[in-house]
Image: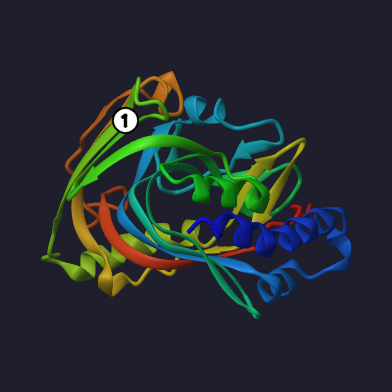
Amino acid sequence: MRCMPYLLSVFLLPIVVFASDAVRSWDRIDSAVFSKDIVHGEATMDGVFQVKCLPAAVITNLLPGGLSLKNTDLCKDGFHPALFFFGAQKNLRAVSKFGSVLVSKRYNESIMAVFSVAYENAAERFLYVTQIKVDSAAAWIFAQPYGGLNKNMSTINSEVGQQTIYSKDSSKLLASAKWAVSASADTNKLAENFNKIEQYFADRAIAKRGAGFTCFGFNWNFKVGKIKSSQLEMKLGDEYVSAALSGTYSDNLSLEDSPLGSFYSSNSWVMQLPLSCPQN
């Protein structure tokens, strides 16, 4: 275990150098193919998800300059969809054709992201990763040079069906979540509602990095047949992401009830090497 940071740095240093060069040389490479051949990240994401319609003005204030909201058919006027996740990541690996390096066996995580985001004049629609809370230093290190993802070290206590998130030094309660998972009674309705949000999960992710942005393919690999209904209650504090989001969210909706309902999934994702974002 003592040699893991060294092995990880040896494996990732060429990746970081390549990524920096690739950002400067976007017009000379095919990112979708080339980056996947060089290296990609893999892990299994295990936890509860929910898409929430939140005031568009509040969501807009979370976006850095250069990004804006694109209309969706998920929310009523004046609101915009955001994604929340509470759970764990398992077997995080950096993978290339030469082999793989295990970055972290298991760590707890909470995500807030924004669906349907526009980047300057690009026609493409993106998923903006607002903030990610993790309790693994290895996962945090992996995210910074690799993708520019806004990961924040936290203390996270997890038990079956619940998670409590504190600041890194445990002095402040940032958020808590409780959920109940159940066998789906109407799998057709669940699949129908998931189809209404699936297109947004297919968008490339965009993250703020330095003065610019990085964009990368993220294949969530959801399997509808393995998704289960759940009900989620989350309490967000002033410092989870923004004081404007603080409060208790408990609508008792499952994915069987609505595309905006909660669901549980265990899915193995693949993240491509981040590169600069094209404009068209």
The spot of residue 182 in percent (x, y) is: 12, 59
Q: Is residue 128 above or below residue 123?
A: above
Residue in the image at 24% along x and 38% along y: 177
227 with respect to 108 (left or right): left
Q: Position of residue 24 (x, y in %)?
A: 87, 53
* Amino acid residing under circle 1: Ala
Q: Is residue 37 left or right of residue 117?
A: right
The residue under the point 42% across, 30% down is 168
Q: Is residue 199 visible?
A: yes
Residue bearing the label numbered 1? 175
In the picture, measured across the screen, residue 243 lies left or right of residue 147, that is left
Q: Alpha-carbon neighbours of circle 1 within 10 Å: few (<14), some, or many (≥20)?
A: many
Residue 266 vs residue 6, the one in the foreground: 6
Residue 233 percent location from the top left of the image? 21, 37
Which residue is at 50% across, 50% downward?
Answer: 139
The part of the image, by quadrant, that contains residue 38 is bottom right
Q: Residue furthest front?
A: 2
x, y percent for residue 70: 58, 43
- Dividing the picture into quadrants, the one containing residue 264 is bottom left
Vertical arrangement, residue 188 with respect to residue 137, above or below: below
